[in-house]
Image (cartoon, rainbow, N blue to C red):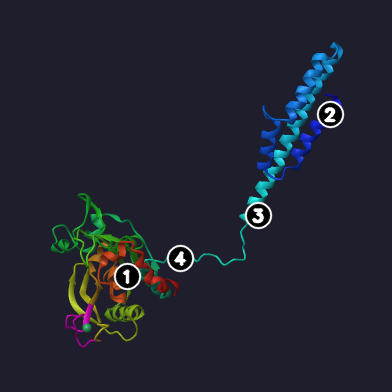
């Protein structure tokens, strides 16, 4: 075999490699021409080996180098082609997976606020628009602030209505947000106050349709010179109209709370019968909504106020109660169950 023939064979192999259109073609070429049983390349190498055997010594070295050169050339050619074809395949894949940004997107449904927060935020907005400050206090509270400063000393029977979770003898989970009022009064004695205190409260209640061991409350306190019952009534009327609508009327029913004197349950006319009496309001025409009253002089005194100069009113409302009445929700537990079917019904309220 002549050297020229061998060179022609090698260049034929390289040409075949160059002509491959895809990786599969390249693998075929490798199997057919470069493998041990392959034709062209082994023929070429065999030809060279024969030449080495018969060549003079000084030629053997050159031919050996030539074998290596052919091998390297073919291998380089193969490797380069492989890289090119892999890149080509990658580009084709990318092209297939190209995203068309002009297509309409998927409609993911947005979440919504829990109705309790809808109501809470609405109440905060309402009172701040009337010039009230918003205060917060600790949920783990001292007995002194939770009861004693609110005219409910140890062994007072009114404590029975507010049994709670005690951390130790003097520390409990607050049963109302009223301790925030006591804390605020003590900070600046004998200065006018207009405040609300929204927050979580706890009582040792069995959970049922209308009770939960944890619930939200918003308490309101106004202390100034000359504050009287008319201020309380007009404030509550505006507040109830804001929450339930202008057609509802309110009435005060005498009640008892240790921290107010006089004390009232505030009732709102029934949305179903407008005061005539129906099943929903148990024939009374009214539904109890919250507790209110004039701040007890003992509370004013204990919190550093001169009760001969200052007077005040206070009321506390359960956020769950308001939400249940406004939306006709029949079970307090629904607020805490995170059932999306329930929660998404209040989406529009959130957007308002
Ligand atoms: Zn009714």
Q: What mark, if any, has residue 150 been given in the picture? A: none
Image label count: 4
Chain-order first, disc 3 or disc 4: 3
Mark nearest the camera among 2 and 3 is: 2
**Mark 3 nearby-residue class (10 Å; few <14, some 14–19, many ≥20):** few
Chain-order first, disc 2 or disc 3: 2
- Work out whether 236 lies above or below 121: below
**Distance from Cα at disc 2 to Cα at disc 1:** 105 Å
Quarter of the rendered image showing ligand 1: bottom left
Return the residue at label 4.
110
Look at 29% across and 80% down and name the residue there.
233
**Distance from Cα at disc 4 to Cα at disc 2:** 75 Å
- Work out whether 281 lies above or below 75: below
In this view, the residue in front, 40 or 121, is 40
**Distance from Cα at disc 2 to Cα at disc 3:** 44 Å
Residue 349 visible in this rendered orientation of the protein: yes
The quadrant the N terminus occupies is top right
Q: What element carries label 1?
A: strand
Is 275 magenta? The answer is: yes
Is 313 magenta? The answer is: no
Return the residue at label 2.
5
Mark nearest the camera among 1 and 3 is: 3
Numbered range of the magenta stretch: 274-287
């Amino acid at each position: 075999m002549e050297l020229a023939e061998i060179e022609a064979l090698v260049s034929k192999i390289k040409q075949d490699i160059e002509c491959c259109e895809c990786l599969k073609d390249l693998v075929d070429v490798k199997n057919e021409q470069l493998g041990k049983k392959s034709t062209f390349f082994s023929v070429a190498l065999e030809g060279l080996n024969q030449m080495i055997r018969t060549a003079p010594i000084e030629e053997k070295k050159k031919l050996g180098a030539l074998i290596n050169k052919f091998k390297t050339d073919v291998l380089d050619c193969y490797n380069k082609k492989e890289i090119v074809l892999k890149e080509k395949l990658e580009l084709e894949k990318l092209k297939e997976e190209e995203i068309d940004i002009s297509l309409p997107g998927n409609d993911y449904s947005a979440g919504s606020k829990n109705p309790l927060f809808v109501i809470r935020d609405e109440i905060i907005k309402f009172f701040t628009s009337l010039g009230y400050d918003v205060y917060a206090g600790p949920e783990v509270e001292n007995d002194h602030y939770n009861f004693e400063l609110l005219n409910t000393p140890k062994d007072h029977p009114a404590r029975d209505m507010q049994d709670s979770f005690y951390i130790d003898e003097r520390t409990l989970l607050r049963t109302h947000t009223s301790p925030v009022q006591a804390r605020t009064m003590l900070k600046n004695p004998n200065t006018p106050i207009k405040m609300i205190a929204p927050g979580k409260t706890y009582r040792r209640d069995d959970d049922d349709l209308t009770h939960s061991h944890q619930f939200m409350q918003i308490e309101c306190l106004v202390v100034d010179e000359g504050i009287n019952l008319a201020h309380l009534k007009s404030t509550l009327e505006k507040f109830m109209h804001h929450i339930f609508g202008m057609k509802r009327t309110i009435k005060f029913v005498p009640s008892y709370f240790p921290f107010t004197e006089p004390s009232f349950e505030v009732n709102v006319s029934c949305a179903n019968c407008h005061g005539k009496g129906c099943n929903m309001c148990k024939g009374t025409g009214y539904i109890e909504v919250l507790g209110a009253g004039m701040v007890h002089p003992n509370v004013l005194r204990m919190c550093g106020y001169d009760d001969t100069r200052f007077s005040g009113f206070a009321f506390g409302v359960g956020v769950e109660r308001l939400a249940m009445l406004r939306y006709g929700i029949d079970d307090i537990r629904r607020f805490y169950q995170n059932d999306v079917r329930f929660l998404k019904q209040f989406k529009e309220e959130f957007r308002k």
